[in-house]
Image (tube, helix red, strand yellow):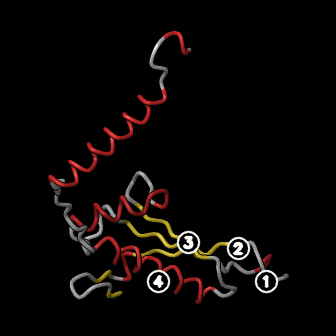
Amino acid sequence: MIHITPTIAIDESEIQYEFIRASGPGGQNVNKVATAVQLRFDVGNSPSLPDDVRERLISLAGRRITQDGLLIIDARRFRTQDRNRQDAIDRLVELVRKASEKPKLRRKTRLTLASKRRRLETKRRRGETKRMRKPTSPSEA
């Protein structure tokens, strides 16, 4: 079990790992050993996630989620499988933790009467300034 919040925990059997060859540092090792990890987590069919968290996770994941609701996280930062696997799990946990936070509801606020007056007064002054720049009669033009 991977504990994310006090109420949300993901069973390890819901996560699949695929090891692939990574580009980057590692010398000859890079050509021989599959150290990069591709973590797959089925968000759409996971019984561990509440519906509201699932919806927020799908929107947060962006391009990392397939049309079938499969979340794919690539981890190739480190040279060993173990560290890359742990990195992928940490990134999944962080993503689900972010999705579990309920967004704050925005309350509409009203402009104060004084701020409306200030805005209109500024507009009036600006208009007056522009009006003063115009020629007053056709003979001056």
Within 10 Å of disc 2 (Cα), the crowding (few <14, some 14-19, many 20+) is many
Mark 2 to mark 1 CA distance (whole Å): 9 Å
Mark 4 to mark 2 CA distance (whole Å): 19 Å
Q: Is residue 61 left or right of residue 27?
A: left
Mark 1 to mark 4 CA distance (whole Å): 23 Å
Residue type of the residue flagged with mark 1? Gly
Marks 1 and 4, the one that precedes in the sequence:
1
Picture quarter with the N terminus: bottom left
Seen at 68% across and 78% down, the residue is 34
Instruction: Name the residue carrying label 1.
Output: 26
Mark 3 to mark 4 CA distance (whole Å): 13 Å
Mark 1 to mark 3 CA distance (whole Å): 18 Å
Q: Is residue 124 left or right of residue 82?
A: left
Instruction: Name the residue carrying label 2.
Output: 22
Seen at 70% across and 73% down, the residue is 21
Tell me if label 2 and label 1 are in contact, CB under 8 Å: yes
Instruction: Name the residue carrying label 4.
Output: 90
Where residue 90 appears, as percent x and y from the top left, is: 46, 83
